[in-house]
Image: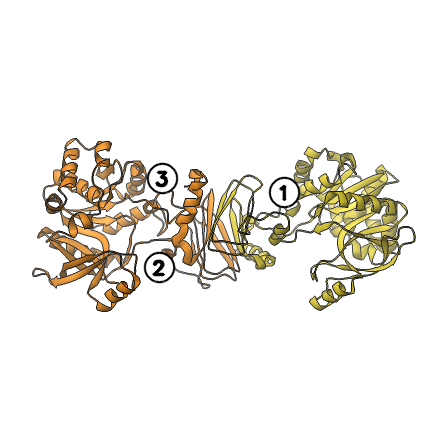
Chain colours: A yellow, B orange
Amino acid sequence: MDHAVIMAGGSGTRFWPESRNRRPKQFLKIAGEEAMIALTARRLLPLVPPERIHVVTLQEQIELAAEALAPLGVPRANLIAEPAARNTAAAIGLTALELRRKDPEAVFAVLPADHVITPVSAFRQRLEQALALAKRGHLVTFGIKPTHAATGYGYIELGAPLADDRAARGIASFKEKPDRATAERFLREGNFAWNSGMFVWRADVILAELELHSRELHDGLLALHRGGAALEAHGYRALPSLPIDIAVMEHSAKGCVLAVDFTWNDVGSWPALEELHDADAQGNRGVFPAGGELVAHEARGAIAFSSSAHVIALLGVDDIVVVHTPDATLVARKDRCEDVKKIVEALRARGRTDVL
Amino acid sequence: MDHAVIMAGGSGTRFWPESRNRRPKQFLKIAGEEAMIALTARRLLPLVPPERIHVVTLQEQIELAAEALAPLGVPRANLIAEPAARNTAAAIGLTALELRRKDPEAVFAVLPADHVITPVSAFRQRLEQALALAKRGHLVTFGIKPTHAATGYGYIELGAPLADDRAARGIASFKEKPDRATAERFLREGNFAWNSGMFVWRADVILAELELHSRELHDGLLALHRGGAALEAHGYRALPSLPIDIAVMEHSAKGCVLAVDFTWNDVGSWPALEELHDADAQGNRGVFPAGGELVAHEARGAIAFSSSAHVIALLGVDDIVVVHTPDATLVARKDRCEDVKKIVEALRARGRTDVL
């Protein structure tokens, strides 16, 4: 049976002050009126019904996930709790064990909770195609056609078309985040795709490949999983912390890339909201999931966000990001938002964990 | 006896969003940990004791004034309520009638509630000097030595030194707010002072001069005041609305100017806070009367204000004013703060009087 697993264990600081330690990006209403995790689940319907949508997230975020997904009918039993963050290989391995136990024939898509994909119809079409490939034993990864020489993504060098689906390509190599010149070469040469972090595979196949290429992790997970659904935290924390790319994909002979034609946005920092929300006539974007309001006088190119019914007023400022929360407000130059972590570090150094 | 009257009937929009229709500038904690009106009263102590400090303000602001001044011991009975805003001549005339009734020998200083003066010792010294001049029948106005060619103030052209106090000067003429070139000439010529809006006079003298030069206003006030302390609103609204400068000072032969040597700040808009608060090493000023905090990374020259315990974070922005309130936040370029009224107008046009 086809399943989907939403990876919701991420943390990060780049959406501070809206994101907090206890409320990371995937639970924010920055891409629409629902949390990103709910938008991710909604995108799967009706191709994957709610009872086959699973979520793997940190134990401490289970309640947030349950709250966000209850309106979509995702069963509470489908939420898999990680006792600690041990990177994607552990989370995926754990989920594969759980799915294989429930459904030995399980095929599942792995989808980060905090990406935005449009149009949904194109996504569903590629997902169906990937599920078909996965059923035949491939480890399918979605490759995004680069639109610019991004240095923030890993790249996949495309190999030869597959014999059983000539739209899919083998994997020639994985490339770490490149420098600018290398990224420009990748773009020019044309046979590179961004590694989207979205995968589709059979539970038994990914587990066999994990056993083959990351034996310690596989065996550790297996032992823990035999202990029951409530994983022993100490043991989980002792597992190797590896991304699935390194644990499996870079070594496996079964990997392939499905180049996709939908628009993909990993919503990396506040300026990503420009691609998700329309601007007004002055080029300003007010993003207010709960009815706030932007008023601007001789201000252009702003992104203003509040999840409360707050008024944000801009006067004579260009290309500014303003994020209001009840206890902290960020005002940043739009092209400096990658450095929000510097603010977070400064607050941590001052002991202001109450706002982190 | 010496009295002081704090003029607290002003309104305005230049400190939005901290100032609101129901909470104008004089009630804000922008110059220190107390409201400006309280700082103004405190400046008078012990030269004028609390029982001889009076306040004239709008009826609807009496509670705010009482709350701000109670800790200083200003009696509630010393708060004089205007039924409507009818400019300074009406407020001063009303107060003079009230003081003369209580104390036929009353001499009083008129002090706007929203100015900052330092050092206090110099202010008290000049006030004593002015009270002495006033007792001899002069209408004393404090003249501020111009520090730059300001176009936002009225000017007084200084006349000859007075015979009875050669430190005081007669008034040659009053000048409206000048254009830039005229202001520069005033500064160059040296015999002009800014009209501070602070005056000292005997109650009976200012009333006699009001009767002489603005008979209609004088007689209207007299009739209303005979009706008792709770003024008849309709009658008060029908009074001529005149500044005291035009109603009396420009016509009176009794005016004189006392050039003062203290630093005077009429706190006209947010950037005025730069003169009232020290900057940190990056040239940023966080003004937080209730324990908020500023955190800045590669940001310079900012003014950040919140009257709640809010964190304001600045990233890569220079010369920005950020004012946080629970329901509205302003982000402005520092040199554009005179246009805050444009924001207020836009909000009014949208019907957002809830945040005005």
| Residue wearing tag 1 | A32
**Residue A235 position (above or below residue B129):** above
The percent position of residue B118, horizontal first and vertical second, equals: 28, 58
A320 relative to B271 in the view: left or right: right
Name the residue: 28% across, 48% down.
Answer: B113
The percent position of residue B303, horizontal first and vertical second, equals: 43, 56
Q: Can residue B40 be seen in this view?
A: yes
Rate crowding at label 2 as few (under 14), some (14 to 19) or many (20 or more) other CA atoms within 10 Å. Answer: few
Q: Mark 3 lies on which chain?
A: B
Q: Mark 1 lies on which chain?
A: A
Name the residue: 33% across, 53% down.
Answer: B268
Image marks 1 and 3: residues in contact by CB distance under 8 Å: no
Q: Which chain carries label 2?
A: B
Rate crowding at label 1 as few (under 14), some (14 to 19) or many (20 or more) other CA atoms within 10 Å. Answer: some
- Residue type for callout 1: Gly
The percent position of residue B169, horizontal first and vertical second, equals: 14, 61
| Residue wearing tag 2 | B275
Distance from the alpha carbon under mark 1 to that under mark 2: 44 Å
Q: Quadrant of residue B57?
A: top left
| Residue wearing tag 3 | B22
- Residue type for callout 3: Arg
- Residue type for callout 2: Glu
